[in-house]
């Protein structure tokens, strides 16, 4: 994943519960909608659930997602690498989001242990705008 967005800022890596989660669906729909609104900052997004390929393809089509979405995440392995919480039944990754800077260092992370508590499009766009503006004035 880091190589896919190397040298880019305004990236949000999302682990989400699955296509069955109404909160995740709302969040996933919000990012493409945010891209077409003026101001604040463009945010590149990538998502990853435990859903299989067909389920993920259906979700992408249903919401018209234009950002990369993986499938078939090994929840325990992802949790071991990132500290993400795993729901035991059904097995899934709890909502987790990371915003890395241009060097790939995570500047914001948000871990949820349940259905709610997640990074949202407008907040991430505002953060990206603030950091870009601050970097430009301090250069």
Image: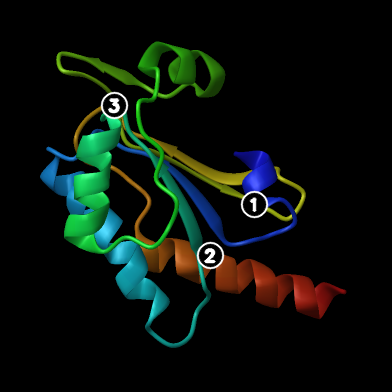
Query: What is the quadrant of residue 138 in the picture?
Result: bottom right
Distance, label 3 to label 1, CA atoms, is 27 Å
In the orientation shown, which residue stands out farthest toward the front?
54
Q: Which residue is under mark 3?
A: 113
Q: How many marks?
A: 3
Element on which disc 3 rests? loop
- Give the residue drawn at x 52%, y 73%: 42
First-in-chain label (2 vs 3) = 3
- Give the residue drawn at x 47%, y 13%: 77
First-in-chain label (3 vs 1) = 1
CB within 8 Å, label 3 to label 1: no
Element on which disc 2 rests? helix
- Label 1 environment density (alpha carbons within 10 Å; few <14, some 14–19, many ≥20): some
Q: Which residue is under mark 1?
A: 5
Residue 107, x across and y down, in percent: 62, 47
- Give the residue drawn at x 12%, y 46%: 22
Residue 2, x across and y down, in percent: 65, 41
Q: Is residue 121 left or right of residue 29?
A: right
Quadrant where the N terminus lies?
top right
Instruction: Work out whether 116 lies above or below 119.
Output: above
User: Which-is-in-front pick, marks 1 and 2?
Assistant: 1
In the orientation shown, which residue stands out farthest toward the bottom?
38
Q: Which residue is under mark 2?
A: 127
Q: Which mark is residue 81?
A: none
Viewer-side residue, 126 vs 53 = 53
- Give the residue drawn at x 48%, y 85%: 39
- Label 2 environment density (alpha carbons within 10 Å; few <14, some 14–19, many ≥20): some
Instruction: Work out whether 26 lies above or below 117.
Output: below
First-in-chain label (1 vs 2) = 1
Element on which disc 1 rests? helix
Residue 5, x across and y down, in percent: 64, 52
């Amino acid at each position: 994943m880091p190589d896919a967005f190397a040298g880019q800022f305004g990236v949000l890596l999302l682990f989400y519960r699955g296509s069955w989660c109404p909160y995740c669906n709302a969040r996933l729909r919000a990012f493409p909608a945010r891209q077409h609104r003026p101001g604040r900052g463009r945010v590149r997004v990538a998502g990853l659930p435990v859903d299989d390929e067909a389920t993920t393809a259906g979700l992408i089509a249903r919401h018209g997602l234009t950002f990369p979405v993986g499938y078939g995440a090994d929840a325990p392995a992802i949790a071991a690498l990132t500290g993400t919480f795993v729901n035991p039944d059904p097995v899934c990754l709890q909502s987790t989001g990371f915003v890395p800077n241009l060097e790939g260092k995570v500047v914001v992370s948000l871990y949820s242990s349940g259905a709610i508590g997640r990074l949202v499009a407008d907040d991430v766009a505002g953060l990206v705008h603030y950091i870009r503006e601050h970097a430009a004035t301090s250069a």
